Amino acid sequence: GNSVTQMEGPVTLSEEAFLTINCTYTATGYPSLFWYVQYPGEGLQLLLKATKADDKGSNKGFEATYRKETTSFHLEKGSVQVSDSAVYFCALSGITDKLIFGTGTRLQVFP
Amino acid sequence: EPEVTQTPSHQVTQMGQEVILRCVPISNHLYFYWYRQILGQKVEFLVSFYNNEISEKSEIFDDQFSVERPDGSNFTLKIRSTKLEDSAMYFCASTSRPTYEQYFGPGTRLTVT
């Protein structure tokens, strides 16, 4: 069945460092791919999405490109801030609208 | 900005008791979902609901679970006889169309003792 694998955390970075959080997926057909973020004490918020191969989703300086050849959707940001500290979830939806999530990666950014 | 709300934020119950988790989706949304996250594990889909019917459910969503939209604003998840392994964070989500963004609530932490 469909699944998502993302890198273990926590990821610890200094402010202004470059961020990559790896995400790969297994799916039949052509899933839509998402990154959700969860700030402390809050619900999951959609960060960005891509619905077809080679699409790039972007928001708040974060980017991810839908790579069908490597079945990946890695999250990147050129310069992280302390306020980016959160848990990041990679997810997909396939034929149905249910979301299938990865385990989440905690990002900690220090000044 | 409209948001999904959930109550209570934390529920403690004894094994075998019934619990009802409540959600108020965004008012013009028509598709509703429950997910759960056991501590340290993945967020897992439980059930989707549209037009007063379950659209899809996972293998987790057995006969102990039920969902209801009792009054046109609330969306509830009932667990009839809780088990220790039901302890988790439960998230409600809603959307206006199934291919659109799902908006999540802040979650209810359920602790079964």
Image (cartoon, coloured by chain):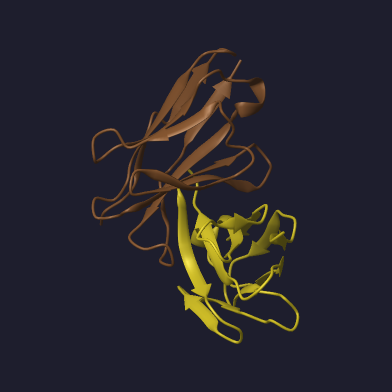
Where's residue B59, x and y in %? 64, 41
The percent coordinates of residue B6 (x first, y second) are 37, 37
Q: Which chain is yellow?
A: A
Q: Nearer the viewer, residue A98 or A90?
A: A98
Q: Looking at the image, can residue A42 be seen?
A: no
**Image quarter hosting the C terminus of chain A:** bottom right
- Residue pictured at 31% horizontal, 50% vertical: B3
Q: Compared with residue B65, is residue A99 higher up or lower down, i.e. above or below?
A: below
Percent position (x, y) of residue B82? 57, 20
Depicted B63 relative to depicted A110: above or below: above
Q: Residue furthest bottom?
A: A54
The residue drawn where x is 46% and y is 21% is B19
Residue B86, position in %: x, y? 61, 28
Determine if residue A103 is in view: yes
Q: Residue at x 65, y 21 (%)?
A: B84
Image side of residue B6 versus residue A3, left or right: left
Residue B11 appears left or right of A71: left
